[in-house]
Amino acid sequence: MLQEHNVVLKNPLQMDIRFASCYPNLYRTAISSLGYHIIYDLVNSREDTWCERVVYPYSRSLESSTPLKSFDIVSFSLQYEQDYFNVVEMLKKGGLNPRKDARGKKDPLVIAGGPCATSNPAPMSDFIDLFIIGEAEVVMDQLLDNYLELDNPREDLEKFLDIEGVYLPDHPAKRVIVNDMDHACHPIHQVVPETNDKNLKPALGSSFLLGVSRGCARGCRFCMAGYLYRPRRETSLKKLFKIAEDGREATGLNKIALIGAAVSDYSKIDELCSGLLEMDFKVTTPSLRIESVSADTLESLMKSGLKTITLAPESVFCVRKSLNKPISDEKTFKVVKEALNFGLNVKMYFLVGSPTETQENIMELTDLMKSLWNLSKKRNSVRFSVNPLIPKPHTPLQWEGYDLKLMKSKIKFLKSNLKKIPLKIESPRTGLIQHVLSNGSSEISPMIQKSLINKIPLKEWEIFASPKDMVAKLPWDNIDVGLKDDFLKKEYFKLIKCVETPWCEEFGCYNCGTCLKKDK
């Protein structure tokens, strides 16, 4: 049983546009996505448009049980590459042909946004009419206005090309972002679910989602979001307190989830946490950066009722350094000890498969994890998650391939040497498929559609997992996220040589191009 509060209901007969906002993942994930709430709030703020939500595995809207085929615009939020299969399934179940070239002029316009759409729309280009490159609130009103001006939008797709941030396959597009976070969309009347079904409960718990910041310029060389959404932009402290108070009045929620690419890098994080506590809020956050976590931050989170913090050391120090995340072991142990002293549990994420990683590093990693686990006196208060490193577009790793055999060997070693500690390891096979979905061209679109009916042999995926030539054209070359062409190559060679690029906010501009600063 699911009851939702703050749902927007309108008279469809009075609407010029019926807009389906689709989340191709489970409800508990969708309802904890601030971006999904932003689209709902933004589109419904228009008097001529009704935005309804459709969440996988369903193909009818939560608001009116309307199938996808009956909407004017069907929009997908692409947060994870593995969701591509769900997009195709939702289209088919919703009465639409997944392939755009097989849909008629009376069918809805199908669009997509989110980080995966921004990084590399090519794998989904056979299914999606238009992509939004960057942050949707910058262009959504203009896109909807254009839609209303056209007699048949699906036959006049090129008319959308005048909108910066809209990508039509095979046409160049430039990323757009919100420059001033105080003027970004901060949804107050967030949808609040009430349910006894644990599968429908929000992944972040019953929390009001507070957009602290966007973007990150730390420069971790494996992190796609860190390159797609530069520069880092903060919401002012005064604005955050106002949003939190208004949000409590609108939702009845006394728990705040701080949302941002690097929440603990927020310049006034301790003031924010202590201020929210003084306002009688409880505070939580999905993850924290080890190098910017203070004892005050941990104490505030503990006092607010948080039970577990999430940290990501990634690997042993020499590998972290090559990935441009040079957190010392000393700092890692210090933060974990402080967290445990405050009674917090600690979940830690690690990566396997960096280009510079050796078998000796894997052996060192097992020792590091054992030492961190031994800091705990309570059973399972320190837990670990290990994932294959997936090279991503628009990062220094974008030319790297995926060696399934080598990945299997490394993960097998970890499993055999870490049997006694609480450990979750992502499948190397899943990593291979994610790599192809992340870095593939439109050539893999048929495989995505075919997978609905037949299981695709791993050998077919491996064909597309080879390293890329650094001088060859990449599937995402038409997507300009603001980075200069040679910047990522320089970062790649620094990775191989294990040379750091210190944080630009502390050490000065490296002229990557995203901040529009003059050359040094």
Image (tube, rainbow, N blue to C red):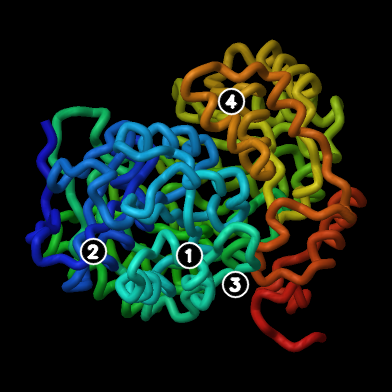
- Percent x, y of residue 33: 36, 50
Q: Amino acid at mark 1?
A: Leu
Q: Earlier in the sequence, mark 2 or mark 1?
A: 2
Query: Where is mark 2, residue-wise?
Result: 17
- Pinpoint residue 450: horizontal percent, then vertical percent: 54, 26
User: Residue 376's spot in the image, x, y percent?
Assistant: 52, 29
Q: Is residue 59 left or right of residue 101?
A: left
Q: Is residue 258 left or right of residue 431?
A: left
Instruction: Quickly name the residue at label 4.
Output: 426
Please report contact status of discs 4 and 1: CB closer than 8 Å, yes or no: no
Spatial separation of the CA atoms under disc 3 and disc 1: 31 Å
Q: Nearer the viewer, mark 4 or mark 1?
A: 1
Residue 422 in view here: yes
Which residue is located at x 74 percent, y 72 percent? 512
Residue 387 in the image: state x and y as whole percent. 62, 31
Dot 3 corresponds to which residue? 231
Residue type of the residue flagged with mark 2 = Ile
Badge 2 marks a residue whose secondary structure is strand
Residue shown at 31% from the left, 69% from the top? 186
* Image quadrant in which the C terminus is located: bottom right
Indicate the amino acid at tag 3: Pro
Q: Which residue is mark 1?
A: 157
- 66 left or right, relative to 355: left
Q: CA distance from mark 4 to mark 3?
A: 31 Å
Which secondary structure lies at badge 4?
loop
Is label 3 in a helix, a strand or a loop? loop
Q: Work out whether 23 lies above or below 114.
A: above
The residue at 37%/68% (across/down) is 272
